[in-house]
Image (cartoon, rainbow, N blue to C red):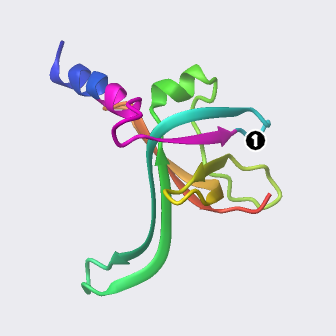
Amino acid sequence: MNLRSLAHSDLIDIMHDTHGGSWPFTITSPGGVTVSFLGWANDIHLSIDPGTDEIVTGRQATVSPMIHDLNIAGFGEIKGVAESDSKPWIVEIDDINGKHGVFKVTSANPDAGIGLTVLFLEEYTK
């Protein structure tokens, strides 16, 4: 097994480990199909501007499912939907305090080298 295959195999184990850093969330397709996933999740409200080293207020929420898991669910490649009159991909997730969040996918950054995709989210009202 080469290093890339080993890294992918290890990442699957890490992402599916409920005692590690993974977190449950659901993704609903524009067609209304909802599937549960385990993956990484972030919801950050402050960051540092690398050009000025100043603190910047701005929410950045992401979830990162395995591409393999998306394919098994029949989702394939997820894309952000910019048009407000189109049905977006929806992500629902509870934060560490149990507060339920509903988000739409604004963009997706798949990494075929390791088999993971990062979905960038913004708050959404159904």
26 sits left or right of 56 in the view = right
Q: Vertical placement of 109 versus 121: above or below?
A: above
Q: Amino acid at mark 1?
A: Pro
Q: Residue furthest right?
A: 85
Front one among 103 and 112: 103
Q: How many marks?
A: 1
Percent position (x, y) of residue 48? 31, 78
Where is residue 24 drawn, in percent x and y?
53, 40
Residue 67: x and y, percent?
47, 30
Left or right side of 83 for 116 = left
Q: Residue at x 80, y 52 (%)?
A: 86
Examine the rendered structure and indicate whether residue 55 appears above or below residue 20: below
Q: Answer whether residue 15 is magenta in the image.
A: yes
Query: On the rendered image, what quadrant is the C terminus found in?
Result: bottom right
Residue stretch in magenta? 11-28
Residue 109 in view (yes/no): no
Q: Which residue is drawn at the image coordinates 36% and 26% (left, top)? A: 12
Q: Residues within 10 Å of mark 1 (few under 14, many from 20)?
A: some
Q: Which residue is mark 1?
A: 30
**Hey, which residue is sitting farthest top in the picture?**
1
Give how far across and how far down residue 85 sits, in percent.
Answer: 83, 58
Q: Is residue 20 above or below residue 91?
A: above
Q: Would you say residue 84 is visible in this rendering?
A: yes
Q: Residue at x 33, y 26 (%)?
A: 13
Q: Callout 1: helix, strand or loop?
A: loop
Residue 103 position by quadrant: bottom right
The quarter of the rendered structure image containing the N terminus is top left
Q: Which residue corresponds to the image point at 45% horizontal and 32% vertical from the top-left?
A: 66
Q: State yes or no: residue 21 in magenta.
A: yes
